[in-house]
């Protein structure tokens, strides 16, 4: 076995064995996001135009006479951003478990970072 600066192969193996599956998934998502050059969701600030990437955890259609909306939660391992497409009932490919890269201006809605009508790109993987 080769020893590395982060504790070696054995330490990494033990960490993967003893860590919860959700935590490992979050770590993997955060690494993928970083490799793509996207901003971590946890660092998105209201007013900024950002590019974030991650996996959709939920997608909900909210009917309304005033403004129906499709709302999704994008999780990247560091945090989540709410995505809202106004006037949409369904968007092909926007479904839980799907990986996306999105771009838009961050707003604060109900204490949560939200991007309204974001540009998006579906990813495979």
Image (cartoon, rainbow, N blue to C red):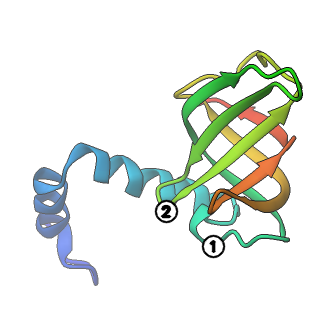
Q: Is residue 45 above or below residue 16?
A: below
Q: What kind of element bears circle 1?
A: helix
Tell me what residue is drawn at x 79 percent, y 16 percent.
89
Q: Which dot marks residue 70?
A: none
Indicate left or right for 11 with 107 as reference: left
Q: Quadrant of residue 98?
A: top right
Q: Position of residue 58 (x, y in %)?
A: 54, 31
Indicate left or right for 23 with 45 as reference: left
Nearer the N terminus, badge 2 or badge 1? 1
Q: Position of residue 117 (x, y in %)?
A: 87, 41
Rendered-image quadrant of the C terminus: top right
Indicate left or right for 79 with 65 as reference: left
Q: Residue furthest bottom?
A: 5
Q: Nearer the viewer, residue 69 or 81?
A: 69
Q: Position of residue 47 (x, y in %)?
A: 85, 71
Q: Is residue 98 above or below residue 49?
A: above
Q: Which dot marks residue 43?
A: 1
Q: Position of residue 103 (x, y in %)?
A: 83, 52
Q: How far, Cα to Cα, is label 2 from label 1? A: 9 Å
Q: Which residue is mark 2?
A: 78
Other-residue count near label 1 (Cα within 10 Å), few / some / many at <14 / 14–19 / ≥20: few
Q: Are marks 2 and 1 in contact (CB under 8 Å)?
A: yes
Q: What kind of element bears circle 2?
A: loop
Q: Nearer the viewer, residue 42 or 30?
A: 42
Q: Nearer the viewer, residue 53 or 75?
A: 75
Rendered-image quadrant of the N terminus: bottom left
């Amino acid at each position: 076995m080769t020893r590395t600066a982060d504790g070696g192969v054995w330490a990494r193996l033990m960490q993967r064995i003893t860590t919860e599956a959700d935590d490992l998934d979050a770590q993997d998502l955060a690494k993928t996001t970083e490799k793509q050059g996207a901003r971590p969701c946890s660092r998105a600030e209201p007013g900024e135009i950002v590019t974030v990437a991650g996996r959709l955890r939920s997608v909900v259609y909210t009917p309304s006479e005033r403004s129906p909306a499709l709302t999704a939660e994008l999780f990247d391992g560091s945090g989540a951003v709410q995505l809202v497409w106004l006037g949409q009932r369904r968007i092909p490919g926007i479904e839980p478990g799907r990986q996306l890269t999105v771009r838009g201006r961050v707003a604060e809605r109900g204490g949560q970072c939200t991007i309204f009508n974001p540009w998006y790109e579906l990813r495979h993987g």
